[in-house]
Amino acid sequence: MFLIDDLLLAPFKGIRFIAESVHDAAEDEIANRRTALRDELNELYIQLDIGEITEEEFDRREEEVLDALDALEEARSTLDGEDGPAASS
């Protein structure tokens, strides 16, 4: 009986495994991108402190990085099936 159950459920287990693998890869990609954006933000602060960029250039680039981080957070929430910040307000 268990052998028949295993045979009948094998395709579904395979699909589930693939879906979980894709989900894990997407989460890893989001985490890597988030780390890169945070590193970029830290670099911007350093550049501003040592005078490599102006305050205006810093503000413009900081806004771009923060917008990208917000978009990543939305993507992560969507990936995990959570409601976004707008839905919880």
Image (tube, helix red, strand yellow):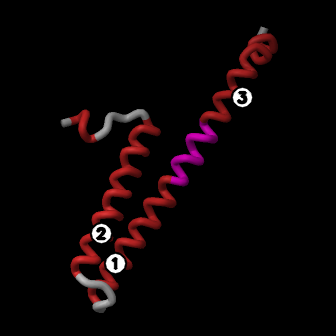
Residue that extends furthest to the bottom in the rendered view of this protein? 50
Up-down relation of residue 42 to residue 22 (above or below) = below
Judge depth for marks 3 and 1 and give the one in front: 1
Residue visible at 38% across and 79% down? Answer: 43
- Residue furthest toward the left? 89
85 lies above or below 57 = above
Viewer-nearest residue: 41 or 6: 41
Tell whether label 3 touches label 2 (CB within 8 Å): no
The residue carrying mark 2 is 62
Q: Are there few (<14), some (14-19), or many (20+) residues within 10 Å of tag 2?
A: some
User: In the image, residue 34 lies at what x, y percent?
Assistant: 43, 60
Nearest the eye: 18 or 86: 86
Q: Is residue 28 magenta?
A: yes
Membership of 39 in magenta stretch: no
Q: What residue sits right under mark 3 in the picture? A: 14
Image quarter in which the N terminus is found? top right
Q: Main secondary structure of the magenta part?
A: helix
Quadrant including the C terminus: top left
Q: Residue at x 37, y 35 (%)?
A: 82
Please state if 54 lies on the left or on the right of 11 as rendered.
Answer: left
Looking at the rendered structure, the secondary structure element under dot 1 is helix
The mark that comes first in sequence, 2 or 3, is: 3
Determine the secondary structure under disc 2: helix
Q: Which residues are magenta?
A: 20-29
